[in-house]
Amino acid sequence: ADVLTTFQTRVAKKDPQAILYLGRAYYHGTFGLQKDTRRAFQLYTEAAELGSIQALSNLGNAYFRGDGVQQDKAKGAEFYEKAAMQGHVDSRYNVACIELEKMNNYRALRHFLIAAKMGHKDSLETVKRLFMGGVATKAQYAEAIQGYQKAAEEMKSHDRDEAKRIS
């Protein structure tokens, strides 16, 4: 069976991951599907209702950009916050960027610190810039570095490193 048929079978069984992937297929116009951001938005909504954290983030993106739905940055931020509270690191970074844009530097810093400790490199770089700009303390920057390094260490894989070495 082809990939699309497999997705559709799993979608019929209310598999949130399959619904999310089908939404992505519509969003990007892959697997022979016509690009349809409205349909993608509907599928992301369904996947989110079934518990997909990535779908919450995708809904945040959709609202923030106006993809398949009327643009509503505040609603996009709400979806990013929901996803961030469930451990989605890119959404945590997005929340931090939104707070920084609003000039809520200390709220933004808190979110960047959390994301950095989850291994998010851009968040670590932003904490560094905040430290250089006098917003973050040296201790906070050190905490971000240590947290980032710990997360990176936890994600290390001997098999992955070996595969990189021989490729």
Image (cartoon, rainbow, N blue to C red):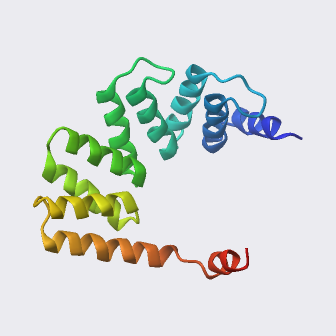
User: Looking at the image, is 22 positioned above or below residue 94?
Assistant: above
Is residue 59 depicted above or below 71 in this figure?
below
Q: Where is residue 47 in the image (x, y as percent from the top left)?
A: 56, 36
Quadrant of the rendering where the C terminus is positioned: bottom right
- Most foreground residue, 6 or 30: 30
Note whether residue 88 is visible: no
Name the residue at the left extreme: 134
Q: Nearer the viewer, residue 128 or 89?
A: 128
Residue 147 occupies quadrant: bottom left
Q: In this view, does 137 lie above or below 62?
A: below
Where does the image place residue 79, in percent across and percent down from the top left?
A: 37, 36
In the image, is 100 to the left or to the right of 34? left
- Work out whether residue 3 or residue 136 is closer to the camera in this orientation and state it: 136
Q: Tell me the residue at 41%/50% (across/down).
A: 90
Residue 87: x percent and y percent? 40, 55
Q: In this view, does 99 lie above or below 23?
A: below
- Identify the residue at image location x=16%, y=63%: 132
Residue 51 in picture, x, y percent from top left: 51, 43
Residue 96 in sight from this viewpoint = yes
Q: Quarter of the image containing the N terminus?
A: top right
Give left or right: position of 125 versus 162. left
Looking at the image, which residue sits at the far right? 1
**Which residue does the image show at 59% across and 78% down from the upper left?**
157
State the image quarter where residue 94 is shown. top left
How many numbered marks are there? 0
